[in-house]
Image (cartoon, helix red, strand yellow):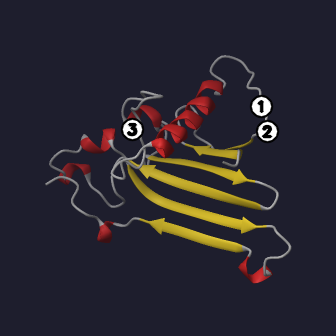
Amino acid sequence: MAPITELRLRNFKSRRDQLALELKPLTIFAGANNAGKSTVIQSILLLKQTLENQEDEQPLVLNGHILRMGSFNDVVHAGDRKNRLHMGFTSGSSSREAACDLTFGAGPKGWKPERAEDPDIYQLEPSLQKFSMVVKNHRPDVDPDEREETYSFKQSASNLTKRLD
């Protein structure tokens, strides 16, 4: 598996503003208390826990075998009015890399908690609002027109499915 070379966060715990952190084979986190060192490490472990999850129904595993983060409100920055969490990473090598960005919410886009029978379910199982991935192939033997592939998904209120029967 290719290493993660960049981590991107916004509205995750203490990080309100966008953070883009370049990662090397040896990355040392140092700083004052409450500077965000644990936040960065927790975000990496949360991604690992989610990617290792075998259940398709859970796009973000807040409470699993590595971390117990609580509810979605416990991980999203308190100052975010839209209640959205953004996480992304770039992984790859000199010949090929993939950049993946994800946006999670406490409910599907367009969802109104006051209209739901059980709004707390989205606090434990946030939904994937947006996903994008760009794969770049840097090999010289690949046709220049085929060096970049883009995949994306955006959930809207019109394509929601009922979560609870």
- Quadrant of the snapshot with the C terminus: bottom left
Can you identify the residue that label 1 sits on?
Answer: 27
**Position in image of residue 121 (x %, y %):** 25, 42
Q: Nearer the viewer, residue 48 or 155?
A: 48
Q: Earlier in the sequence, mark 1 or mark 3?
A: 1
Could you classify mark 3 by the number of other residues whose Cα lies within 10 Å: few (under 14), some (14-19), or many (20 or more)?
many
Task: Tell me which amino acid carries mark 1.
Answer: Thr
Can you identify the residue that label 2 sits on?
Answer: 24
Dividing the picture into quarters, in which one does residue 72 lie? top left
Task: Tell me which amino acid carries mark 2.
Answer: Lys
Q: CA distance from mark 2 to mark 1?
A: 6 Å
Query: Which residue is the extreme one toward the top?
Result: 33
Dividing the picture into quarters, in which one does residue 22 lie? top right
Callout 1: SS: loop
**Position in image of residue 95 (x %, y %):** 80, 61
As drawn, 50 above or below 137: above
